Amino acid sequence: MNKSVDERDGQKVARKIREAILRLELRPGLTLDEADLAEQMNVSRTPVREAIIQLISDGLVHRHGRKAIVATMDFDEVPKLYDALLVSSRLIHRLAAEHRTDEDLAVIHKTMLAFERSKDVSNGVERSEANLQFHLAISRAAHNRYFSTFYDNALLGTIRLARACFAQVSTVEYLNPTTKEELATHLAETERQHRVLYAAIEEYDVELADKLAVDHYVLTRNRVEKVLFRVDPAVENMDLSKELP
């Protein structure tokens, strides 16, 4: 009984810590103190330990001796990260189209609508959270925990990268008319792609789901590239497409 309660608590703690890492509230390189986290979340240290084990598996935390540290982001690894996202995304969408159940489809549809409701321009974190849940729902519909772990880790890594980039854009720049127009266009295209991905999975269309997964990957990659260019003028004239697949 107590063990099952600790397991449920561990899942909740892992989710809260994961969200804090993705929101950059827990910064890369920060040492996680089990006692402090247990006190903040009003749980025992056991579920915190379970959560840290899960986050290590997710690639968001790593061990340094006895310390648990929020994983740093190595920008030299970005091309490899996007390689992993492309390959794993194609696998997951093919499998989801082949193996999804009606229950899976209902969850994907629910998370798709939740993303469409999160249109507040000033709340990029909320939108990103909704987008993450949509893609995790597709991952679960693949019904292959090995490929899902591969995909989820790549997905979380690219989301961390995107949030780190967007966090460096000033509020004035982020909300100026040109940027807002670009963002609205990007969101509209994201919604459109989500809907056609959903339709392909609904129709068990494996080949179309694969093609659309590539299209969605390109949309995601290009968005991050634009922000990287905007944040760092020194790379303004670089062509990252030569480094990314």
Image: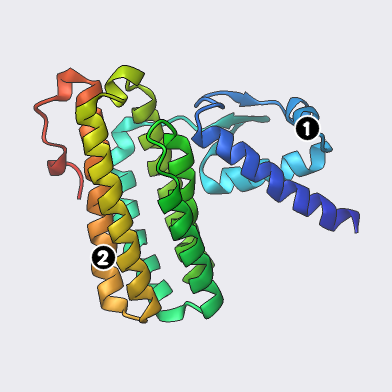
> In this image, 237 relative to 163: left or right?
left
For the residues bearing labels 2 and 1, Cβ distance under 8 angstroms? no
The answer to whether residue 225 of the structure is visible from this angle is no
Task: Give the total number of marks visible in the rendering.
Answer: 2
Q: Residue type at mark 2?
A: Leu
Instruction: Report the disc number at residue 212.
Output: 2
Residue 15: x and y in percent read 63, 45
Q: Is residue 146 above or below residue 19?
A: below
The residue sitting at 44% across, 59% down in the picture is 112
Q: Is residue 46 left or right of residue 173?
A: right
x 52%, y 24%: residue? 29
| Front-most of residues 81 and 114 | 114
Compute the Cα span from label 2 to label 1: 42 Å
Residue nearest the observer in this picture, 223 or 181: 181
- The local secondary structure at tag 1 comes to helix
Residue 88 found in image quarter: bottom left
Determine which residue is flagged by label 1. Answer: 38
Decide which of tag 2 and tag 1 comes sooner along the chain.
Answer: 1
Q: Where residue 24 sits in the image (x, y, percent)?
A: 50, 28
Task: Judge by depth and name the residue closer to the eye, 20 or 81.
Answer: 20
- In this rendering, which labeled residue sits more in front, label 2 or label 1? 2
Above or below: residue 125 compared with residue 210: above
Image quadrant in which you'd find residue 94: bottom left
From where the camera sits, is residue 240 visible? yes
Other residues around mark 2 within 10 Å, as few (<14) / some (14–19) / many (≥20): many
